[in-house]
């Protein structure tokens, strides 16, 4: 019997729809990107996070897959099923990046993209339709 998440496993994660929204805050040393994905629940003292974030990047681009999962602890071993999956990418940054970190907030995945050289990307982001 196929599990309810079999259809998600068969799909290319990069073909998933994008987040409901994305907000950019440009700073000289980093770029903050907030991806709006309803259903994200961050880790708390009482509960584990329900979201997996997979990032692939190089110095000039980023691919991010956000998956909201449900864990069935009644099964042995516990079984994860994907409830929602969202794909986000930046095909080319205006300049080289050094690192990407992420953290979860309610209904939001917050990416911090560290720039290799301190500079404003606002003009290029507007030009390439990122804002």
Image (tube, rainbow, N blue to C red):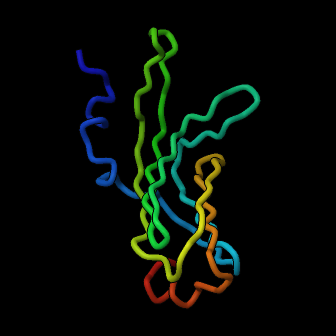
Choose top left, top right, bottom left or bottom right for residue 91: bottom left
Residue 31 in percent (x, y) is at: 62, 72
Q: Residue at x 46, y 12 (%)?
A: 77
Residue 121 in percent (x, y) is at: 58, 84
Choose top left, top right, bottom left or bottom right for residue 128: bottom left
In the image, 51 versus 39, the foreground residue is 51
Residue 76 in percent (x, y) is at: 45, 9
Seen in the picture, residue 21 relative to 26 is either above or below; the reply is above
Q: Residue at x 65, y 86 (%)?
A: 119
**In which quadrant will I find the N terminus?**
top left
Seen in the picture, residue 117 relative to 13 is either above or below; the reply is below
Q: Residue at x 50, y 63 (%)?
A: 21
Q: Is residue 58 left or right of residue 40?
A: left
Count numbered badges in the picture.
0
Q: Residue at x 33, y 48 (%)?
A: 13
Residue 107 in percent (x, y) is at: 59, 48
Q: Is residue 80 left or right of residue 110?
A: left
């Amino acid at each position: 019997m196929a599990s309810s998440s079999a259809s998600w496993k068969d799909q290319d994660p990069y073909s998933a729809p994008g987040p409901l929204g994305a907000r950019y805050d440009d700073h000289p040393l980093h770029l903050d990107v907030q991806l709006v994905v309803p259903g994200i629940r961050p880790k708390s003292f009482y509960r584990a996070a329900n979201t997996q974030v997979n990032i692939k990047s190089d110095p000039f681009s980023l691919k991010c897959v956000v998956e909201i999962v449900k864990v069935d602890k009644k099964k042995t071993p516990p079984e994860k099923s994907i409830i929602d999956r969202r794909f986000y990418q930046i095909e080319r940054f205006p300049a080289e990046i050094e690192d990407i970190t992420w953290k979860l907030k309610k209904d939001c995945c917050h990416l911090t993209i560290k720039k290799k050289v301190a500079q404003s990307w606002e003009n290029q982001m507007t030009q390439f339709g990122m804002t």
